[in-house]
Amino acid sequence: MSEWKEYKLGEIANIQTGPFGSQLHQSDYVDVGIPSIMPVNIGDRMNISTEKIVFITEEDATRLSRYCVQEGDIVYSRRGDVEKCAYIGKAEIGWLCGTGCLRIRIDYSKADSKYIAYYLSTEDMKSWISNNAVGTTMPNLNSSILQQVPLSLPSLDEQKRIASILSSLDDKIDLLNRENATLEAMAETLFRQWFIEEAKEDWEEGTISDLIDFNPTRRLAKDTIVPFLEMSNLSTSTYAPVYWYDRAFNSGTKFQNGDTLLARITPCLENGKTAYVDFLTESQIGWGSTEFIVMCSKLGLHPFFSYVMAKYQDFRDYAESCMAGSSGRQRVDVDNLKNYPISIPDKAIINQFNINIESLVLKMQINNKQIRALKAQRDILLSKLMSNPNII
């Protein structure tokens, strides 16, 4: 392996702060136009999330062209969750590095931008960023801090080789995630067609509590070390949580495989945070945030029925209408949520649904196991390929 050299990020990159509020006002955002990347759009996998993306006019994009991004740029949030960064790909060329963000543009004669993005995503670099951010109540970044980020880099050719290896693993992960998104959409379509759109007139009228058990009893002895799931690790786009870890149980919501976890607090419910539990061992009980509502299918319905029900927009709207409490800390009143009206299907429909949904869930679970294995492999490689005894 070639000799590694020490740099500061500012020596190999130009760091640009996004436009300030005086240059781009809230009233300037439009329904259709050029996407503007905000802190909320910086994803967990160096990606840009288009959920809650805002848009500006082409005229404003031209006026603010010095803040637009190109392929290979890296974007950080200036405040809040400052550890994450996003890599700009072909799809985001010409988008705006919006208010509240910082743009890093690498000098390609000195470093490979994808390698630098991976480097900045290592735990050591995340810790450095977090420890050097300013502010007590909310971490803040600025261009001066990013300029001082320490880097230990191999030759440019070796950087490209390492980035290529890591990118190939990420490509496989993305492919599996896209396949799971399609399978999940198919499951949700099955639910809507069979239980909502084609509900029979002779079905008995009932409520959601006839089909789903809310917050069922789960027993777990205090101080038992089992998987723990934080609210922040629930996804807004797929049933699989982002991350969980072992922790001694003290007080929290308990769940088991086959349960669905629905966020009951604002803004997590509105943001779509939901999970289907399938990551525990057989008979194991996990635990997590007290802000989870646990949903478990009844009447012989497939466990995944609870998840697709929880993702159904009309049900989510009803859940939002059941919120109570002070502004900013509202929570769903579960007793009211149980009154959501729905027809009770006959056994024949339940059996047909179960058969069809099982094949979809099985494939998603196989994919998720592969995703977790690939992520573990990538993280190990990320640590080994970028390790250097002189770092930091």
Image (tube, helix red, strand yellow):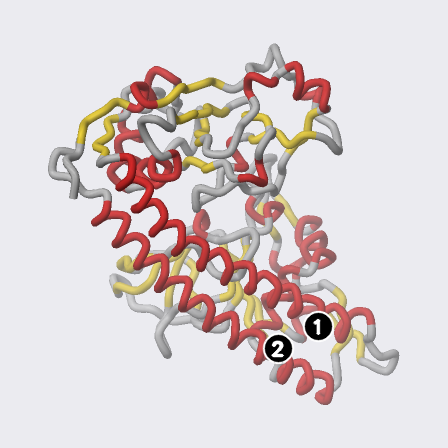
Residues 371 and 307: in front is 371
Question: Looking at the image, which residue is at 53% across and 61% down?
Answer: 239
Above-or-below relation of 103 to 367: above
Furthest residue in direction bottom, as rendered: 348
Q: Position of residue 35 (x, y in %)?
A: 64, 32
Amino acid type at mark 1:
Leu
Q: Which mark is residue 307?
A: none
Above-or-below relation of 136 to 312: above
Q: Is residue 327 left or right of residue 281?
A: right
Residues 268 and 382: in front is 382
Q: Position of residue 342 (x, y in %)?
A: 76, 69
Residues 45 and 202: in front is 45
Above-or-below relation of 273 to 193: above
Question: Looking at the image, which residue is at 36% across and 20% down?
Answer: 135
Helix, strand or loop at mark 1: helix
Q: Which residue is mark 2?
A: 357
Q: Is residue 121 left or right of residue 54?
A: left
Question: Looking at the image, which residue is at 88% across and 78% down?
Answer: 201
Q: Is residue 44 left or right of residue 178?
A: left
Q: Position of residue 271 (x, y in %)?
A: 59, 46
Determine which quarter of the picture holds residue 298.
bottom right
Q: Which residue is mark 1?
A: 190
Question: Looking at the image, which residue is at 23% across and 47% down?
Answer: 385
Residues 336 and 307: in front is 307
